[in-house]
Each structure stands twice: as structure tokens, then as C-alpha cells.
């Protein structure tokens, strides 16, 4: 699917096969939340983000309404992706909202701001994907943290 964020002129591309893969991974943890990193690359003008993959955390805390990924091993995996052909980099985060809404919670907004401020894998505009999941299927919500505010891709 192709999405745009008109307010700030950014575009997002993601394959449906990847979304299916994330949904299937998320459902293994249903009804608890689950998630990980999003990887991909940017166009030369930096206006289009192409999400191509995910890295899953080895350690995490999760419950029905909470997910926090650990960091163990992720930097090493990102380093490998950076040197792979084609190169891919960290572009953001994803997690599920089992039987929930695709909108971000206040905690989600704060977490994205923290990542923008402090993440050692620095990118200026990290993407947040929330997958509202249920046994019947999923609805994705895509957001981008830009200049201290979370915008929705449509
Ligand atoms: Zn959330």
C-alpha cells in the first residue's frame, strides 16, 4: 500500500505481504500485544520511506495493553542490514493493539518522542505502525513523528 502525509509532504510504501507477516507474528502472541522494529530505506530526496522488513526483539515485556521491546542484539542485526545489498536501515517501530484501535495511545506518542530524542539509531522521523488485530483480520495505522508531533499517514 502507498500512503501520504499531506501535512508534511512525506510518502510511505509498504508491501501487503509484510503486513500479513506482521499480523501472523502478532497473532502468535494474541491477546497480548507484540511488536518490533521496522526496517527499510528512503528515497534520495528523503521524502518517501519504503518499509521492507522487521526485526523482532529477543526480549520484551508485554500484556493485553502494553508492549515494550528490549534492545538486546538489535544493533548488531541493524549493522548487518546496513552492510547488506540492498542496504536497509531502522525506520521505526510497530506493535499490535489486540481487539483495539489503530490509533496511538498517549504512551505510544511519548515512546515515539523518546525514540526521536534518544535512540542511538538516529533517524529524524521514525515511523510508528499500529496493527489493530483480531482473529478476523487487521487494520493498520501508520504515523510519523515529525518535529515533536505525531502525524497520521493516509
Ligand atoms: Zn500502543
Image (cartoon, rainbow, N blue to C red):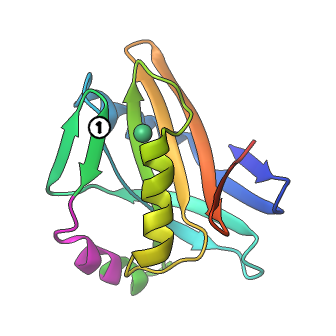
Residue denoted by label 1: 66
- Residue 87 percent coordinates (x, y): 49, 80
> Viewer-proximal residue, 21 or 91?
91
In the image, residue 115 sits, relative to residue 46, either above or below, namely above
- Asked if residue 85 lies in the magenta stretch, the reply is no
- From the viewer's perspective, is 85 left or right of 11? left
Chief secondary structure of the magenta span? helix
Q: Which image quarter holds the C terminus?
A: top right
First to last magenta residue range:
70-79
Q: Report whether residue 18 is seen.
A: no
Name the residue rendered at 39%, 87% in the picture: 83
- Asked whether residue 1 appears in the rendered view, the answer is yes
The residue that appears at 37% across and 14% down in the rendered structure is 135
Residue that appears at 43% across and 24% down? 133
Image vertical order of residue 154 relative to residue 44, above or below: above
* 76 to 8, vertically: above or below: below
Amino acid at each position: 500500500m502507498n500512503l501520504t502525509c499531506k501535512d508534511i509532504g512525506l510518502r510511505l510504501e509498504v508491501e501487503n505481504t509484510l503486513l500479513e507477516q506482521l499480523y501472523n507474528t502478532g497473532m502468535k502472541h494474541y491477546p497480548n500485544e507484540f511488536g518490533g522494529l521496522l526496517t527499510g530505506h528512503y528515497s534520495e530526496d528523503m521524502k518517501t520511506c519504503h518499509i521492507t522488513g522487521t526485526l523482532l526483539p529477543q526480549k520484551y515485556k508485554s500484556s493485553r495493553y502494553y508492549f515494550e521491546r528490549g534492545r538486546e542484539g538489535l544493533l548488531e542485526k541493524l549493522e548487518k542490514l546496513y552492510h547488506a545489498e540492498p542496504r536497509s536501515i531502522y525506520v521505526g517501530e510497530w506493535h499490535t493493539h489486540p481487539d483495539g484501535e489503530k490509533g496511538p495511545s498517549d504512551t505510544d506518542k511519548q515512546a515515539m518522542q523518546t525514540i526521536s530524542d534518544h535512540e542511538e539509531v538516529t533517524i529524524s522521523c521514525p515511523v510508528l505502525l499500529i496493527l489493530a488485530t483480531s482473529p478476523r483480520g487487521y487494520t493498520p495505522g501508520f504515523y510519523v513523528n515529525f518535529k515533536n508531533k505525531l502525524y497520521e499517514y493516509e
